[in-house]
Structure formats: structure tokens, C-alpha cells
Image (cartoon, rainbow, N blue to C red):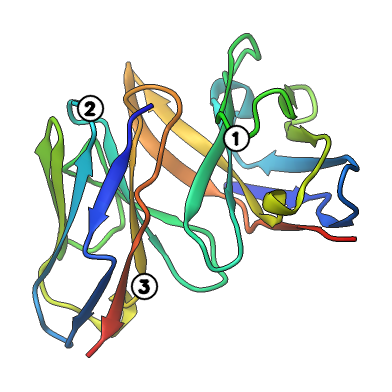
Amino acid sequence: QVQLVESGGGVVQPGKSLRLSCAASGFMFSRNAMHWVRQAPGKGLEWVAVISSDERNKYYADSVKGQFTISRDNSKNTLYLQMNSLGIDDTAVYYCAREDYRSGTIYGMDVWGQGTTVTVSS
Amino acid sequence: DIQMTQSPSTLSASLGDRVTITCRASQSISSWLAWYQQKPGKAPKLLIYKASSLKTGVPSRFSGSGSGTEFTLTIGSLQADDFATYYCQHYNSYPYTFGQGTWLEIK
């Protein structure tokens, strides 16, 4: 079945780096733009970044621009989020999500992973 | 950046009630709006896309309307499974911002 599975979360000290992965299965991964969305404890959803299906285009939230890098390996059906210089404010559950796009219309983020927790703490 | 403002932040309702949640965009986003439902400890679930189109498999008691800057999500007759947090999100341009969420609780 269509599935996204995140990994790579954990406890990390402020200023350190972490790379998250999102393994896709059950669909043609290379055809979809992919997003990262995060949710700090007890807070709402925050869109983080997007990468186009062909990796050419990447966009970031202002809060992570220059700090996070989104990438993908279509041969491995995997999405990544490289997070550098982590701060307390980056503590959150990080979700990857598929953008459903067909015939010129975006149908929203229709498939989500279960999330991976990143805790930044000394 | 486009800001999304939801109201109310919390909504108390009873089983069988009809409820409406409002989402306002800081500038026109045409119909590029989605609604998501999230339950505690779970990933968000897409309900509505393009402001008023129901995702396949989502119960018909959910409906969306609006365009431009004003949007609504209506739940026709609340079921026990509907008590959750709801978010709107625009996808008119990057960044794709979310509203702050509306927590729908049992009265």
C-alpha cells in the first residue's frame, strides 16, 4: 500500500546536525513533489520545505532557510531533510508528506508519514 | 508570505450538531486551500482540497466552501470520530502556510 516512513529523529544537542529520511513505497515516488511539515509539542502544523519531483526546485520556510536542506534520491525512493545548527525551537515531530498533483491541479498533501521526533536539548 | 487565520480556536459541540470553522487568507488564494483533520499523536489527514472538493473516502458530512480570502469547513452532523483538531492550509504560493488550528471538543 501507499506508505511513507520517516526515520532519523532523536535527541541532539543544540548546535548539532541531524538528517531525517522518509522512505516511500507503493507509488511512483519520482512523480510527486514532497514536503516536510513539523509540529512542535502542543503547537500547530508548520510547513518546512518542499522539493519538486525532479529535484530542480526547492523552497523553504523562512524559519529554516539557510539551516535546513531538503533533497531526494528517486532511485532509492527516499526523501531527506538535513538539519544543521539545531536550536531548541527545532524540537518537533517532523512529517513527510506527498503532494498529489494531477493534470495541472494540486490535490493537497494526501499521504503522510507517521512522523519522527526531534528533540534538541543539552 | 500569506497568513492564514482560523476561527474559532476552540469549538465545543455535541453529537449531531452542525459546525462551521472559518479560515481567512491575508490575500487572495483563489481556491488553493486544503483542510486537514488531526487526532492526538497521529499524522494529519486530508479532508478537502481545492477549497470544496472532498477527498475520496471522506464522509459526505464534511464540506468546504469559499474562494479568494474566505473559506469554511462544515461538518453536517457531528459523529464521535470527528472530535479532533482541524487545520486549513493554502497552496497558492510558497510558503504553504497552515492556519493555527481549531480544536473541536465534545460539549
Q: Describe the element under mark 1 as helix, strand or loop.
A: loop
Q: Chain of mark 1?
A: A
Q: Position of residue A113 (x, y in %)?
A: 61, 52
Q: Of tags 1 and 2, which is closer to the observer?
A: 1
Of B52 and A19, nearer the camera is: A19
Which class describes the residues within 10 Å of circle 1: few (<14), some (14-19), or many (20+)?
few
Mark drawn on residue A63: 1
The picture quadrant where one finds residue A24 is top right
**Residue at 77% across, 47% down:** A87
Foreground mark, 1 or 3, reads 1
Query: Outermost residue toward the bottom?
Result: B107
Indicate left or right for A21 with B20 as reference: right
User: In the rendered image, which residue does mark 2 sit on?
Assistant: B29
Query: Are dots 1 and 2 on a single chain?
Result: no
User: Which picture quadrant has residue B42?
Assistant: bottom right
How many dots with numbers? 3
Circle nearer the viewer, 2 or 3: 2
Helix, strand or loop for disc 3: loop
Q: What is the quadrant of the C terminus of chain A in the image?
A: bottom right
Q: Do badges 2 and 3 share one subunit?
A: yes
User: What is the CA distance from the residue labelled 2 to the residue labelled 3?
Assistant: 26 Å
Q: Label 2 is placed on what type of residue?
A: Ile
Name the residue tied to disc 3: B84
Secondary structure at badge 2 equals: loop
